[in-house]
Image: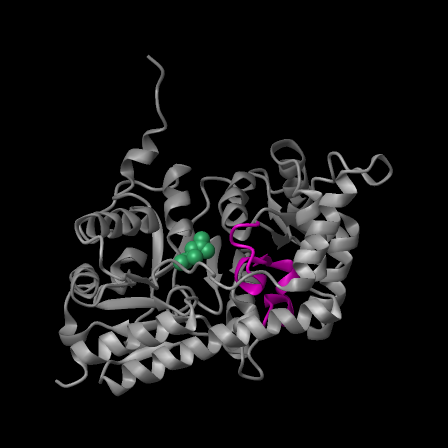
Amino acid sequence: MTLINENYLKLKAGYLFPEIGRRVKAFTDAHPDAKVIRLGIGDVTQPLAPAVIKAFHDGVDDLARGESFHGYGPEQGYDWLSKIIIEKSYKPLGVELMPSEVFISDGSKCDSANILDILALANKVAICDPVYPVYNDTNVMIGRTGEANDKGYYEGLVYLPCTEANNFTPAIPKEKVDIIYLCYPNNPTGMVATRAELKAWVDYANAQGSIIFFDAAYEAFITEPGIPHSIYEIEGAKTCAIEFRSFSKTAGFTGVRCGLTVVPEQLMALTASGEKVALNKLWNRRQCTKFNGVSYPVQRAAAAVYSEEGWSQVQETISFYLDNARLILEGLKTAGITCYGGVNAPYIWLKTPGGIASWDFFDKLLNECHVVGTPGSGFGPSGEGYFRLSAFGSRENVQEAVRRIQEKWGNR
Ligand code: MLT
């Protein structure tokens, strides 16, 4: 019989969010009248901006006419989209990029997984703990790890704990690592990195010859001045960092699918015999072979995010979600619950009341308040005793969820 990739059998449980979905379904099947509020997976709820919808429609209309029809597009995305992104999203930060360095894709989740294709399995990888589970699981799937231990740490990966004790800031590892995943604003903790903290990572990476995978999917939610939106705002980052960005949370594209990955031309890695190779070329080769580009109407819709009208509409939606985050943060604090994040990110990271285990809190919140969140331990062992609430709900649902939580835990 055909043999499987046994690395998949090392994975501890199902992927986190489907597992939550399964538990919620079991609950709603048993309690069909319960008004369940879902603040688990970070999925947007507000409609696309009108300017984006118009461009999307126009893109589809183009496909209906012979003279404006588009077949296969460039695997790297249309030049006009890359140029707008550079102009509107990077130039204002003082970052110069070339269109050849920007690869449009169907999302940063896929890219942050697919990027592993172009780097050797022998690389030592460091990830934060807790972490967006994709970074951990894709390294297991590709065969970089041994089995997980009792705590849930996989043999072969270096884990960087982010807890209250270190203000959720990972310490630079003492040992040499070749690849470091950083995500800021952070999923799940909602915390950010200062310029000095990122500078320390960039200096480490350049000194060691390591590469940083910088996931900036939530950069649009940064409200505090001085917090970097891109790793390339840090001097030296172009020789050590790949950046992932997404339209999902920025512009409500979770169901539309569009993201981008920046691979600077200067970024090099080595062959086993010590020869330098540009990663831009390898990623381009990988995309040309395994990816056929994002659909034309979706790229038209993405470009409209940067129109004057589109930008202000998108900013309004981001402010709406950030107001939700503030309501959750303040509401939970009033109930005596210790919370983090929620200021520069759409996630609130809370300590479970009474220190109960994350999944027990999940069940309690679902059964007693009919509110769904995400157990901190699902993001890694150091997330145990924490819980994540997403601010992407409707205003009514967010207010109602806070009210139910306050009613349950407020008077202790
Ligand atoms: C999350 O809830 O962590 C995210 O929505 C997952 C994702 O973006 O893939």
Magenta span includes 319: no
Q: Is residue 234 magenta?
A: yes
Q: Using the image as rendered, state which of residue 211 and residue 58 is in the foreground.
A: 58
Q: Can residue 77 be seen from the camera position used here?
A: no
Residue 96 at x, y percent in the picture: 75, 66
Q: Is residue 141 left or right of residue 401?
A: right
Residue ID at (65%, 45%): 276
**Residue located 47% across and 57% down the image:** 180
Q: Is residue 174 left or right of residue 275?
A: left
Up-down relation of residue 354 to residue 269 (above or below): below
| Direction top: furthest residue | 1
Residue 270 x/y as whole percent: 59, 44
Q: Residue at x 33, y 47 (%)?
A: 18
- Position of 220 compared to 381: left or right? right
Quadrant for residue 190, please give it: bottom left
Q: From this viewpoint, which residue is outermost toward the front?
A: 33
Residue 271 visible in rendering: yes
Q: Position of residue 266 (x, y in %)?
A: 70, 55
Q: Please state the extent of the stretch shown in magenta in the rendering.
A: 229-256
> Ligand 1, what quadrant?
bottom left
Quadrant of the rendering where the C terminus is positioned: bottom left
Q: Quadrant of the N terminus?
A: top left
